[in-house]
Image (cartoon, rainbow, N blue to C red):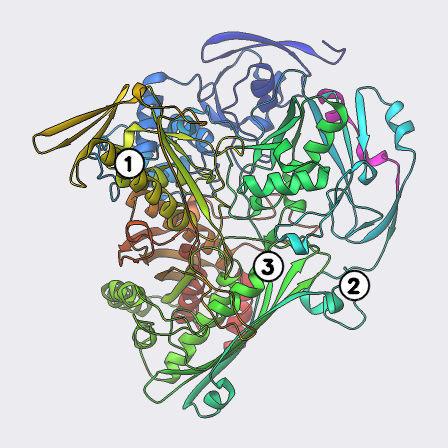
Amino acid sequence: MTAHEQHIAFTVGGQPHAVFASPGARLSEVLRDHLGLKSVKVGCDAGDCGACTVLVDGRQHCACLIPVAQISGCNVETLETAEPDLRSRLQKAFLAHGAAQCGICTPGVMMAAMELLQITPLPTEAQVETALSGVLCRCTGYRKIVTAVVATNRTLPDSVRPLPGASVGARLPRLDGQPKVDGSEIFGADYAPEGTLLIRAVRSPHFHADFVLGDVTAWAAARSGIVAVMTSADIAGVNAFGVIPPLADQPALAECTVRYLGEPVALVVGDAARVEALDLGDFPVTWSPRPHVLTEAEAGGAQAPQLHAHRPENTLIRGRVVSGAPQEALRASAHRVTGEFRTAYVEHAYIEPEAGVGWLEGDTLVIQACTQAPVMDRDDTARVLGLPPERVRIIPAAAGGGFGAKLDLSVQPLIGLAVLKTKRPCRMVFSRNESMRSSTKRHPGTMTATIGADEQGKITGMTFHGDFNTGSYASWGPTVATRVPVHACGPYKTPNYRATSRAIHTHGPTAGAFRGFGVPQAAICQEMLYDELAEKCALDRLEFRKRNALVDGDTTPCGQKLDAVGIKECLDALQPHWHRAGKDAASFNAGSDDRKRGVGIASCWYGCGNTALPNPSTIRLGITPAGALRLHQGATDIGQGANTVIAQIAADALGVAIHRVEIVGPDTGMTPDCGKTSASRHTFITGRAAEAAGRALRAEILRLTNLSEAAQIIVAPGEVRVTEGRSSRTVTLSDLDVDAFGYALRAEETYDPPTTALDEDGQGTPYAVYGYGAQMAEVEVDLKLGTTRVLRITAAHDLGRAINPLLAEGQIEGGIAQGLGLALMEEFIPGRTENLHDYLIPTIGDMPEVVSILVEKPDPEGPMGAKGLGEHVLIPTAPAILNAIRHASGARITNPPALPHRVLAALRERS
Ligand code: FES
């Protein structure tokens, strides 16, 4: 106990507790650190996200805003201590309705729901939306949360128990859901061994500066509790990481020069309480600020400061796809449209800031942190630290959202440095400000395009160029520059085509992967122009798209012949909604002067997996002598459902009940490489590996029993029973040799999609499988205020075979929420919006009704016909909304988000 600490008594779940704490300590810290109630999550420490919502005397509060002294004598409820019967019903409802994805917001959401349900046991949707309005969720799009809370005290769906071999297609609740709904899930900040030291980073206050460090040793010695200070001089390996190794350029700790606001230059490690309390503003570093550039337009200028000497004109990379004779085709077109569009930086805004912990196990450095790419983390961290990869083990903590940004290293090399230097466990937890300053963003883009059509409304040609602001370091800039030209025409037959792109360095935050790799930005450009082109052709906008939609046998601008193309089916599925919505809007508008309604439509296509590069996944499936069936899958489930979907595919391929499957990993020490959670690749690629492993294990069992493919397999304690008609045979597992992995029976299979490299004109096979979709937005625009309300989104997506419709709907609703943010409110301004009250993301009140239509056009290459879905679902939302705004009001928004002042400016321009 220190001089500042006081004895504070209160009850938690009715049980008395007393803590010695500073009276001003946040209740969230006290509950987590003193009482071990880790369901209380910390997302912002500012009352913005609501992840720390608890009940104090029955009322919901953000625990981060309450000084602990204020709850003296009060009763606090967290998810761990809440009333068991109601909690159990709520948990069942959340699981049954798919209301938890990553799970980081779930305890806070559930506590807010409990307050409501204790007062109003049978709430309406509107009451739920009001009660939950203080808690943000970045994954789900809120609709399933509302459904779950409404259903809690009503009838819950029966539990789903698919027959053996028949789990694919079932609305199976996520297999890893229970820890998410009971608050026991371990996220990056939730675990630390006894005696763990805390790491804090000293970060640049400038966008661009040279710096000189002073006497850091003397600075540390003058303060108690500091165990080590580290700078780039402590880095034994290569001080440059990056997701594309030949372009790796980002220092773990900057050397002499910083290139973005918040770049780390030193680490301070020590006793947690003391390091937490340090003022790092007096750390001995002298800054010499230099000129900086923040936009792609500024950075391309002749006088612009150059970020990397070996990348002239700040150009990281260029992309290009050319086919036919686009200029000639455009000249000869009966109709042409052209336009320029500019999009903003967009923040991932996952509710969990980056966090992790590391320790030594013998010679092995173990790091448990939130991530989307464990093997890549291992290799990159080892390279920075100068260790062989086998001496680094990455155990992914649960990731509280990722959406692309947790593909890049964040805390991992910094934790590794500290552990190796101190030889003690060390942890690092980014504040919200640190997270938003240092994490990657969606690339801002400046895009111009011209599209032509003939008299019949058939597209004749297109030219496109996009400059994308890739920020200070390479990250995924090359992927965006490559992927955009492949996709910039949308899912429409375009016989003559030229699409080019550049990724340009600036001193803004590094732009990286964010759900779609640049394709959502390009879709805004192409789909808004297609609306204008349809009008020039005097065609209905949906009809124009159907007339030009790719079909089986068509060739893309890359020269790839397609099959299993489902875009026309998606557009057909929207047709009845389109007619109804058009009539509804016209009838509303006839009676309204100040508010007008409109309908917009947009499509998407998206290649699943890396662009024209190998990206294999390997799955191991084994049966132990005791009869446990284990699926080793290294695919990180960041909420999208890989743990469930991959298990469903494996179980059905083997022909067993899904509930027999135990999931192992991901963990680089225990699971083979399944690659990254990116590019909507796991259902397709990891799923194909799981299907192959399941079939191989089944074939081995059938071989041992000499029965045919029609036989049924039951994995039971100590044995595998196989029956076919009246024949029944048993494999006694203890009779078999046990392999090096501890299995009596095992299969391990790898799948790498058949792509080819692209030539200099972008010709080749960039992806083996594409998914397709189309969305329709109905909006209401206030012509006086410039505000836009989205009333409904109808989304039709071709996902091949729907492995799990419940989770697929969750992906659609979550992607739509992020697309709505892109269209209407999200704009990250470096240095100004690095918190969740200046940077706004959709709340529960912003989300409209979502009608999901699953179109299943099986792909022969996908596992059981499945395609990817995760990124596709975001792509059409923003252009559909922007097209609806124009339809409603005439406002042509070319620089989203469509903030009210931009809508009003566009209306003035029109008039
Ligand atoms: Fe709500 Fe991930 S499930 S933030």
The tag on residue 443 is 3
Q: Are marks 3 and 1 in contact (CB under 8 Å)?
A: no
Give the Cα distance between marks 2 and 1. 60 Å
The mark found on residue 306 in the picture is 2
User: Mark 1 sits on what residue?
Assistant: 700
| Dot 2 alpha-carbon crowd within 10 angstroms: few under 14, some 14 to 19, many 20 or more | many
Q: Is mark 3 within 8 Å of ligand 1?
A: no
In this image, 332 relative to 477: left or right? Answer: left
- The answer to if 836 sits in the magenta stretch is no
Q: Position of residue 853 (x, y in %)?
A: 28, 55
- Residue 134, compared with residue 240, is above or below; it is above
Q: Which residues are magenta?
A: 272-285
First of labels 2, 3 by sequence position:
2
Quarter of the N terminus within the rendering: top right
Residue 279 located within the stretch drawn in magenta = yes
Q: Nearer the viewer, mark 2 or mark 1?
A: 1
Residue 111 image-quadrant placement: top left
The kind of residue tagged 3 is: His
How far separated are the C-alphas under marks 3 and 1? 48 Å
The correct choice, above or below, for 393 with respect to 508 in the image is above
Q: Is residue 893 visible?
A: no
Q: Overall secondary structure of the magenta stretch?
A: helix
Report the Cα–Cα distance between label 2 and label 3. Answer: 19 Å
Asked whether the beta carbons under mark 2 and mark 3 sit within 8 Å of each other, the answer is: no
Q: Position of residue 804 (x, y in %)?
A: 30, 44
Residue 50 seen from this side: yes
Kindly identify the amino acid type of the residue bearing the numbered disc 2: Gln
Which percent across, then down, holds residue 705?
Answer: 21, 31
Percent coordinates x, y for residue 145 in the rendering: 36, 38
Which of discs 2 and 3 lies nearer the camera? The answer is 2
The amino acid sitting under disc 1 is Glu
Which element is circle 1 on? helix
